[in-house]
Image (cartoon, rainbow, N blue to C red):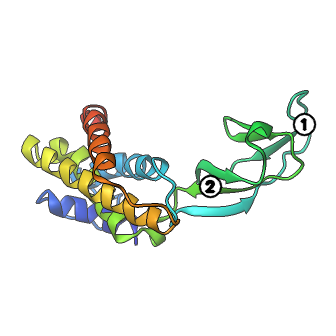
Amino acid sequence: MAKVDVANKALSYLGEDTILSFNDDSEQARVIKTHYDLCRNTLLQGHNWNFATVRASLTAVSGHTDPVYPYAYEIPANCLKIVRTDSCEKNWRRYRDKIYSLDSTFPCEYIASDSEDYFSPLFESALVFYIASVIALTVSGDRATQQDAFKLYGQSLLGAISANDLEQGKKSLNSNDGVAMRRGLHSLSSNAIISS
């Protein structure tokens, strides 16, 4: 799945012309280029998505000297968050673009930003509607469409999380979880959407 395909689905939902690339000379391309990566990374960082999880052994930084954490590791450029490690939780901390650790190796799992090729259909739907809700006022000026897109985003996100968690052997969301999440999405809407 290419970034531009996801972007065009959001633009189509809003009734806008689609783009060939983020560098097109159009208002739609400029707005999408401004918001796409942040929208994608926000959704990816918000949950431990199976499709976006990468397992790696991080590269040690040479010449690192620290009295508390004797080892440091480079965080990959595409790492949005570390989700699991083979290290005890108390043995490491993230500082800026590095992991400081008590351990001489650092195998871990992390959420990768460049995961478009692996998006689940439900996550893709959530991202499409989230992007549409963020850019709606800028490209169409229609608040009702923005609110509808955000509602569809919330519904798609709940489905995506439930399907993802079932693949980890977790129980699916129950109705109380859904109510709590919708309340969280409602509070997010006042922060995330206004940025457009």
Quadrant assignment for the N terminus = bottom left
Can you say whether 21 is above or below 59 in the image? below
Figure quadrant of residue 143: top left
Numbered-mark total? 2
Q: Is residue 17 visible?
A: no
Label 2 neighbour load within 10 Å: few <14, some 14-19, many 20+: many
Q: Nearer the viewer, residue 66 or 108?
A: 108
Q: Residues within 10 Å of mark 1 (few under 14, many from 20)?
A: few
Foreground residue among 14 and 107: 107
> What residue sits right under mark 1 in the picture?
70
Whether residue 31 is visible, yes or no, is yes
Which circle marks residue 110 in the picture? 2
Q: Quadrant of residue 121?
A: bottom left
Give residue 156's quadrant in the image.
Answer: bottom left
Nearer the observer, 106 or 59? 106
Viewport quadrant of the C terminus: top left
Residue type pointed to by label 1: Pro
